[in-house]
Image (cartoon, rainbow, N blue to C red):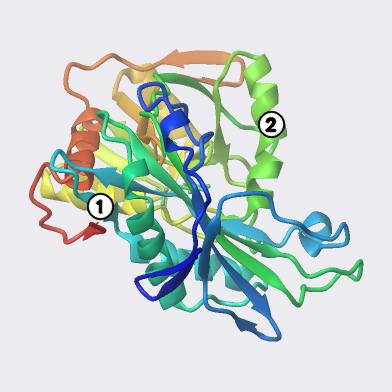
């Protein structure tokens, strides 16, 4: 069955799985919708994207993704308001960042219209999959990888771009205990840390597993030179509140330019919260914890919005953070999610309506 949605060709799934899904008990990112968007890069160009039934894809064992790791992705969400309207949050930022990542991994740039028009058509088709329970959303996973084959260590000649969708429940991480990393690094100067490359995650799993064995749910990444400055919290940007100032590290080769991070900086300014974008030394954080001026630490990213930190370990010592009646983390999370779910005025122009 062929149809068109918003000028995008659609091959419809024979049956829908939507009635098999328990929308009251959704995990994060493990149930998928009926359709996905696919575009292929062949003969030197990206072909017009089309929507097809969600399902397995077939690749040669010699496909370069398996050997040389040319693989990048994005993470975004669609939110449903009480009237059934569906919204995206700053989607062009994801589109631009995908192409920034693509450039670093020698993957050909995707035309922005393929990303945006394809995503809008897919979401219009799948709008009933956007959950409406509080805190839940439709997680959107755009990704691109080398599908061209050959054991020669060089960029592939063929690539695939796919957008898959996963209705997801609220992301409750609870407060986490983190370990400030002294040995391993997530990223290095001149490396790919600023790109959303799959390999960055592969390299994080082992140190994160070692930290988990010691009772920490997450790693605070430090700079690769001397492990002197804190840079990210797991796969999130990191914020530290000392007294009443909110501090985050500047973006660099090693730090991903998070959309949540920059939205938090703008909202904090709007709330008259003092912000500083500068290097944060581990020494400064430890001293602040000791003298009681360290009020909060939290991760920031699309999945959890903010992920509050209960305490951290460093050089065999554990430091607890205070429990505050009114935290910046809660206040900023509320402001951002009120915009995302169309519950508040959008003075920054961040919302993008789908239907
Ligand atoms: C995706 C990601 C973030 C958060 O980016 P958002 O745009 O806010 O979702 C932060 N750090 C790393 C390493 C990431 O991969």
Q: In the rendering, at what x and y percent does residue 187 appear?
A: 63, 50
Residue sitting at x 65%, y 14%: 214
The residue that mark 2 highlights is 207
Nearest to the observer: residue 87 or residue 191: 87
Q: In the rendering, at what x and y percent does residue 6 appear?
A: 34, 71
- Contact? badges 1 and 2 (CB < 8 Å): no
- Quadrant in the picture for residue 217: top right
Nearest to the observer: residue 136 or residue 125: 125
Q: Is residue 105 visible?
A: no
Q: Earlier in the sequence, mark 1 or mark 2?
A: 1
Q: Please tell me how crowded label 2 is: few (under 14), some (14-19), or many (20+) other residues with Cα within 10 Å.
A: some
What is the secondary structure assignment of the residue under circle 1? strand
Q: CA distance from mark 1 to mark 2?
A: 36 Å
Q: In the rendering, at what x and y percent does residue 142 appear?
A: 51, 57
Q: In the rendering, at what x and y percent does residue 238 appear?
A: 42, 40
- The outermost residue toward the right is 151
Residue sitting at x 32%, y 49%: 127
Residue sitting at x 83%, y 73%: 154
- Number of marks present in the image shown: 2
Residue sitting at x 29%, y 31%: 135
Does residue 46 lie above or below 150 as drawn?
below
The residue that mark 1 highlights is 87
Does residue 328 lie above or below 37 as drawn?
above
**Residue 322 relative to residue 282: left or right:** left
Nearest to the observer: residue 301 or residue 20: 20
Q: Please tell me how crowded label 1 is: few (under 14), some (14-19), or many (20+) other residues with Cα within 10 Å.
A: many
Give the foreground label among 1 and 2: 1
**Residue 319 relative to residue 91: left or right:** right
Q: Is residue 335 visible?
A: yes
């Amino acid at each position: 069955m062929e149809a068109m949605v918003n000028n995008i060709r659609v091959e419809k799934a024979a049956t829908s799985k939507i009635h098999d899904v328990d929308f009251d008990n959704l995990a994060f990112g493990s149930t998928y919708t009926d359709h996905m968007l696919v575009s292929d890069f062949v003969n030197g160009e990206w072909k017009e994207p089309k929507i097809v039934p969600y399902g397995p894809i077939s690749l040669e064992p010699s496909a370069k993704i398996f050997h040389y790791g040319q693989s990048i992705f994005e993470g975004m969400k669609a939110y449903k308001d009480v009237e059934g309207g569906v919204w995206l949050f700053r989607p062009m930022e994801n589109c631009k960042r995908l192409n920034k990542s693509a450039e670093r991994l020698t993957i050909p740039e995707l035309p922005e219209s393929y990303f945006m028009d394809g995503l809008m058509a897919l979401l219009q088709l799948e709008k009933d999959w956007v959950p409406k329970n509080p805190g839940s959303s439709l997680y959107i996973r755009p990704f691109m990888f080398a599908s061209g084959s050959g054991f020669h260590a060089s960029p592939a000649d063929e690539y695939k771009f796919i957008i898959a969708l996963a209705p997801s429940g609220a992301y409750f991480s609870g407060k986490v205990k983190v370990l400030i990393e002294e040995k391993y690094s997530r990223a290095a100067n001149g490396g790919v840390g600023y790109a959303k490359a799959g390999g960055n995650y592969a390299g994080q799993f082992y140190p994160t597993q070692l930290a988990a064995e010691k009772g920490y749910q997450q790693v605070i990444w430090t700079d690769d030179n001397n492990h002197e400055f804190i840079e990210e919290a797991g796969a999130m940007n990191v914020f530290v509140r000392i007294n009443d100032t909110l501090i985050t590290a500047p973006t660099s080769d090693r730090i991903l330019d998070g959309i949540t991070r920059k939205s938090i900086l703008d909202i904090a300014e709007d709330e008259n919260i003092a912000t500083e974008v500068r290097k944060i030394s581990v020494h400064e954080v430890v001293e602040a914890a000791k003298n009681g001026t360290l009020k909060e630490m939290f991760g920031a990213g699309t999945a959890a919005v903010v992920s509050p930190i209960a305490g951290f370990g460093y050089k065999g010592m554990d430091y607890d953070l205070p429990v505050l009646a009114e935290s910046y983390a809660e206040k900023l999370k509320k402001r951002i999610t009120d915009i995302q779910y169309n519950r508040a005025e959008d003075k920054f122009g961040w919302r993008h309506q789908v239907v």
